[in-house]
Amino acid sequence: MARQNYPPYHRTVRVMCSGRVDPLFIIEGFLAGADGIMVAGCKLGECKYLSGNLEAVVMGEVIYLVLENIGLNIKRFRKEWVSSSESARIAEIIKDFTKILKELGPLGKGEGLDKETLILRLRAAENLCKNMQFRAQYANLCKEIKKLGDYSEESIKAKAQQKLSKVIKNKLYEFEIKKLMKQGPQSLEILQEKTGATPEEIQKILESFKKKGG
């Protein structure tokens, strides 16, 4: 990009539009070993697909919510809106993001998570992003925000919390606890440590498993 100098550890993945970036892509990136992921799109209001980057704004706020729920620092994900003519600014943004990631440390270690717990939680997030209930509610959220026409980060964050917080937390915990229980009987303390769930949340999920016969 205009012969700018970039940090040697970054990798660029081109997509047709930032609006095509699915939450699943971000989680898969972390599973592939990335310490941080940035989505960069056209400046807001300048998308040739009209609302593509606005949809990416919604996706970003949902990713922040998922990362918070699996115990990863939300600074590991970043979204930026720049013009294709601003190569120097893009280079500075990448350098700044690289600096932040170095300060955070390797994925998981910087958050105090061992490798086993990190993979467990990322797999849970991957499973969540494929879950039809989550995807339906995520699609409805995008439609509602588009209808309202309010793409401020504060508004989207509040709507995401309201519409998706419960399903995100429940599906993550369900997957993690089921995965751990398949390894054999687990103490409440181990389930708490690995999932980050409260004893009450764990008890509810275990009871739901019994009702389902699982």
Image (spheres, grey):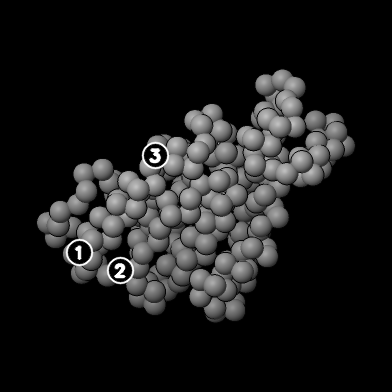
Left or right, 214 with respect to 160, comes to right
In the rendered image, the vertical position of residue 170 relative to residue 112, given as above or below = below
Foreground residue among 67 and 160:
67
Instruction: Point out residue 88 in the picture as x, y percentages from the top left corner.
Output: 18, 64
Residue that carries the numbered disc 2 in the rendered image = 82
Residue that carries the numbered disc 1 in the rendered image = 87
Q: CA distance from mark 3 to mark 1?
A: 28 Å
Left or right, 102 with respect to 195, comes to left
- The quadrant of the image that shows the N terminus is bottom left
Q: Is residue 59 something one can see in this rendering? A: no
Residue that carries the numbered disc 3 in the rendered image = 106
Label 1 crowd bin: few (<14), some (14–19), many (20+), radius 10 Å:
some
In the rendered image, the vertical position of residue 156 relative to residue 168, given as above or below = below
**In the figure, residue 117 lies in which quadrant?**
top right
Q: Which residue is pictured at 39% across the width and 77% down the height?
A: 45
Instruction: Point out residue 102 in the picture as x, y percentages from the top left corner.
Output: 32, 46
Q: Secondary structure at mark 3?
A: loop
Q: CA distance from mark 1 to mark 2?
A: 9 Å
- Sequence-wise, the earlier of marks 1 and 2 is 2
Q: Which residue is pictured at 51% across the width and 47% down the height?
A: 72
Instruction: Point out residue 73 in the picture as x, y percentages from the top left corner.
Output: 48, 50
| Amino acid type assigned to the residue bearing label 2 in the image | Val
Identify the disc placed on residue 96.
none
- Sequence-wise, the earlier of marks 3 and 2 is 2
